Image (tube, rainbow, N blue to C red):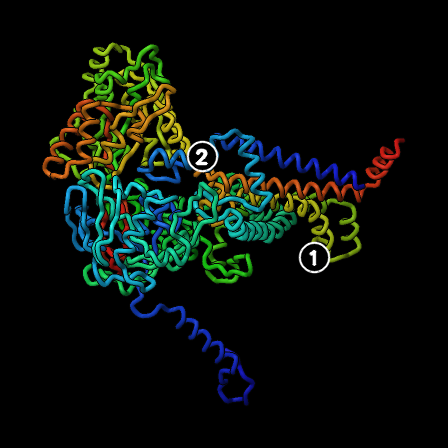
Amino acid sequence: MLRVRSDRGAPPRPGFTASLAFATAMATLALMAAPAGAKTLKWASQGDLNSADQYMRNQTLSLSILSNVYEGLIRRDPKTLAIEPALAERWEIAEPTRWRFHLRKGVKFHDGKPFTADDVVFSAQRVVGKGSDLKGRLPGVKEVKKVDDHTVDFITEKPNPILHVEWATWGIYSKGWAIDNKATEVSDPSKGDQPNFATTHANGTGPFKLVSREADVKTVFAVNPDWWGKDKYKHNVTEVIFRPITSAPTRVAALLSGEIDFMEPVPVQDIDRINKNKGTKVIVAPETRVIFLGFDQAANELKFSSVKGKNPFKDKRVRQAFLQAIDIQSIKTKVMRNMAEPSAMMIGKGIQGWDASFKRLPFNPDAAKKLLADAGYPNGFEVQFDCPNDRYVNDEPICKAVVGMLQRIGIKANLVTKTNTVLFGEYQKFETSFYMLGWAPGSYDSWNPLHFLHRSVPMDAQGKSKPGGTFNYGRYGNPKVDDLITQIAQETDQAKRAALVKQAWGMTIDDVAYIPLHQQTIAWGTRDSIAKIVPHAGNEFLWYHVTMK
Amino acid sequence: MIAYIVERLIQSLLVLVAVGLIAFAVFQFVGDPIANMTGQDTSAEDIARMRENLGIDKPLLVQFARFAGNMLTGNFGVSLRTVRPVDELLAERLPATLELSVMAALFALVFAIPMGVFTGLKPRHWLSRAFLALSLVGISLPTFLIGILLILVFGVLLGWLPTFGRGDTVRIGFWSTGLLTASGWKSIVLPSITLGLFQLTLIMRLVRSEMLEVLRTDYIKFARARGLTNRAVNFGHALKNTLIPVITITGLQLGSIIAFAIITETVFQWPGMGLLFLQAVQFADIPVMSTYLLLIALLFVGINLVVDLLYYLVDPRLRAERGAMERGV
């Protein structure tokens, strides 16, 4: 406070400078104070969006964040994963090869323009166009026709009972906006072209608008006050600030210190810490991702093993021996600290086709040794075991535990762990004899893992693979299963289809095509600034399921 | 003289080409970016098409030639990971790293010199012993651990400072600075300490040993004999003479600070060049890696070229030799 030279005895009055300073301070405080009712959700994840264009990459984090901005014709209930109406109010299979969708009326894009069938037709062209990684959203669709402003027909080549199952993450783009901003195609970074407007800006129908994007630093979203679902899905979030924090300890520290309200994933060893800390807790739910082990079942001689002249993994007894040597409960309690759900199937609970009647063969090292002896390997053998070290939760520790367990039955598994960037390149060239992989079907339907993991992969004369199960890196193959997979893709009767799916799973489990280990668990770290949050079984974080205090 | 310059330029160019070739040879082993750019359901045809676009299956020389050609036309490519033009990306990240490095160096200097002087003047004082013991911490603890420790104490337990990020930044032209906002200053404290602690230890011990040396010299004795105050002797004469090697070392260390920033940037999620490069390697983001490496090579080659030319100007023997050679003597 400035002392003004005043007469002796009179109390000092605040000078002009002091008053100005005080007024400025008050004004700044007033500007800084958020408007009444503003609720900001600050959260962090390990990775970042790769761009603001939802069609650029088919990856859970990007899709999940952008699902708050762009919406599809259907949505999924977060708990049951059941299909519900979104931009389409209802739909029917008018003929076996024609689906008709009735669009919601009165919906607007963030720029104010109305949502109509033209936008759906345009988005269908864009999603199968150049640069899009989401081409699989419209499998076998030969035409998308506008019937009227709020009705669209999808015509498929063959009947497809699961045409729409992945459409919750196929966002509808505005045709006018895309044309005006020269974003009708998806930028393709592999071509080195300058990225277009849609990689840094977004215009959807969803509950949040994209305000600003700084790659690797911060992406800011603001609530869309005109969202069609605001009365049905009430929430009070007005602003969302997303920041990537790659270092796990830093992410935990940020949650504990209160700088963020939510973060994922929580490393398993920090779950107790966060729960014990006042004001934070961890929400745990099973994820649809299943971790499993695969075998090279096609080579005549394994590339990386001590067995010469033949391939032990072609013998089901050897595969079964491996399965029964693994003590999955120990892995759950000791390695995963109970953050895993042992699985008998290659899919998790909640995926169409999951069946509680399929049971895992029991852990029995003696039976396993006997099987190996019967198959002609009484002294076991050596084989290289490939494992990623930065892709799945505790991937490397799980593999190390498996090595120890296989040792007990005489198998010497030489563990080689690599970053997934290098490893998956090798998998794609079939350069592995025994490996770990994980899978979460984005369609929440069985056809996806059956096709991608179990469909046989024929090779041509030069040893190059022909189209088949793209991620069937061990080249498991059973012609009966292939037939079933083809039928499943086309059977429109739900009951018949479910029976075919069950039959296919029964065969692959019987064949011991893979060794499923467990379902991963989602761990979400939250602060008590969040009053209510609904976890999503597919690990998507949708902000309209959040209520802040 | 011209011949000298031309010769040096050609040498520099050869070095750049060699660096480029080695870099591209190494890229064969970094892994497959395509797996990181696509999702589960991407078809084999799309994967093959992207592979064709990127040219990563082509021979090393072809890839390098393509890259060099693009660079000469000013096209530095697009980052595969963040889908942004690489030159924009690097320009964005450079201020963050430079600011952090300079602040770390300043932190080290501002504290190390007084600490070094004190421990040099009063080697048996308990505070000196404390400083020396603490300095061992700076040398022996890895940067990662120091960073996490500081985050834990000042970010989580005390809640005084932010645990990550750069705070709010202000853009002036192409430079984004965190030094004009309160949150920016709060955010730069812990990373600077983490990064500068090693330098602090180094400089402090250097100043201390230099002080001890200098204080034993004759001219100091004569100054004291003459009756100059302690202050004049210690700071006016002794300190000035210790500073020469300190400045040399600090200059050299600035380069290593910028290099070690990678770890600090990762711990604090500091959006600088170090973190960018690390993420590029993890992703196999070849356009970013190749531009970054070539840029660093260019920087060092450029500095060396300037130094060589300065030698030529400064050292008359070089000029005489060359002159003699040219005249055929």
Q: Earlier in the sequence, mark 1 or mark 2?
A: 2
Within the image, what quadrant is residue A231 found in? bottom left
Horizontally, residue A199 falls left or right of residue A136, namely right
Q: Position of residue A273 (x, y in %)?
A: 30, 45
Q: Which residue is mark 2?
A: B52
* Front position in the image: A28 or A86: A86
Q: Which residue is mark 1?
A: B231
Horizontally, residue B31 falls left or right of residue A543, namely right
The Cα–Cα distance between marks 1 and 2, rounded to whole angstroms, is 71 Å
**A458 over B309 or under it: above or below:** above
Image marks 1 and 2: residues in contact by CB distance under 8 Å? no
Within the image, what quadrant is residue A544 found in? bottom left
Q: Position of residue A15 (x, y in %)?
A: 51, 82
Figure quadrant of the C terminus of chain B:
top right
Figure quadrant of the N terminus of chain B:
top right
* Front position in the image: A498 or A256: A498
Q: Position of residue B86 (x, y in %)?
A: 51, 46
Q: Residue at x 21, y 43 (%)?
A: A163
Q: How many numbered marks does the figure carry?
A: 2
**A131 over B63 or under it: above or below:** below
Q: Position of residue A22 (x, y in %)?
A: 46, 77
Element assignment for label 1: helix
Q: Amino acid at mark 1?
A: Arg
Q: Residue at x 50, y 61 (%)?
A: B170
Residue B145: in sight, yes or no? no
Q: Amino acid at mark 2?
A: Glu
Q: Chain of mark 2?
A: B
